[in-house]
Image (cartoon, rainbow, N blue to C red):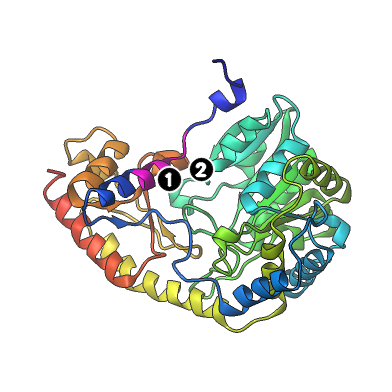
Amino acid sequence: MQFSPKVESITPSSTLAITAKAKELREQGHDVIGLGAGEPDFNTPDYIIEASYQSMREGHTKYTPAAGLPALKQAVAEKLKRDNDLSYRTDEIIVSTGAKHALSSVFQTILQDDDEVIIITPYWVSYPEQVKIAGGKPVFVEGYEQNGFKAEASQIEQAVTDKTKAVIINSPSNPTGMTYSAEELREIGDVCLKYNILIISDEIYEKLLYDGAEHVSIAQLSPELKEQTLLVNGVSKSHSMTGWRIGYTAGNKEIIKKMSNLASHTTSNPAVMAQYGAIAAYEKDDGSVEKMRAAFEERLNKVFDRLNSISGFSCQKPQGAFYLFPNVKQAVDASPYETTDEWVTALLEKAKVAVVPGSGFGAPDNIRLSYATSLDQFEEALNRIEQFTASRGS
């Protein structure tokens, strides 16, 4: 059977691959510690669960508008005003089945065949694949490690061609946890305005910031940048609602309308009970978001120095999200393995620790470890990693 060339071009997710291998080993009875998780290890707050349950008891189990419940879009608009000082009308907002679906819908809506999208490395694994599925071409700009894995405006400008349609900004970043300052964003924004390039701002880790770091949305910086930006966010990371699949896009009314038309022929609407849960998430604050953020910060501060002390590891301290992204080139070079991917596979098979190779993020010398797990588990994982590197992977 022949398959779609677009689907054939997709690279399998390295995150899912390592997760599947770890699951296989667990099923065989091995004590595997997984540090690949891209989701908080807290349950969804009770008040959100109760609101969702109550909505079903009240009969809210039918279709909603494809772009989402008007009440949820209003709650999103109020959240954006309250948290980000951004004013959006409800016809400038669409609710999707998670931020991943929101991003995919953006690309399918704005891209024509061979349009280019500038993606800064390291990047979230799905950005380039989603661009390719939509018929576009990923163009990579390196965020150098010595610059906090962030790209400078001059690098963005050098990558611009007459086919450039958009640039993706992810701050705080997955996988690095680094954030862009207002000045850095303004400089990148000036380039985008100069060449009339759309900005896709992925802000899903907005609430998970540490050491006094503050979130800045590029859309906040000027009315012109707001008009040029498609802001993507959701409740998955902020409220530990990954399985609920509620994300949203805020931006230009005409683009949002086209995305709504697309949704009407693909998903129909996000699950209605999940939408009611998201309304509760944005309308009430019981302190659970801050409690979770504080727990992640405590873990980060307790494990960071220990990780950096492992022979062959070099890690910058992240400002957000819940990942550590150390460079392990020296550790790999001292081992019998030729690539980081091989080293990661051996770490899982021999030390029973699952981490994600950086190759899937466009950074082959790095690995990603999630501290969205218990402190005891993470510290035991570091013990095993240290023993593995000391034995040179044998």
Mark 2: secondary structure: loop
Residue under the point 77% across and 37% down: 110
Q: Mark 2 = which residue?
A: 125
Residue under the point 42% across and 40% down: 14
Disc number for residue 3: none
| Image mark count | 2
Q: Residue furthest top?
A: 1
Q: Magenta region: which residues?
A: 12-20
Disc 2 packing (10 Å; few <14; some 14–19; many ≥20): many
Residue 57 percent across, percent down from the top left:
70, 73
* Left or right of 16, for residue 391: left
Given residues 138 and 189, the one toward you in this image is 138
Query: Along the polypeptide, which appears first: circle 2 or circle 1?
Result: 1
Above/below status of 319 relative to 259:
below
Residue 105 percent across, percent down from the top left:
71, 43
Residue under the point 70% across and 39% down: 107
**Quadrant that contains the C terminus:** top left
Mark 1: secondary structure: helix
Residue 292 percent across, percent down from the top left:
49, 75
**CB under 8 Å between discs 2 and 1:** yes
Residue under the point 17% across and 51% down: 388
Above/below status of 375 relative to 157:
below
Disc number for residue 15: 1
Above/below status of 66 relative to 378:
above
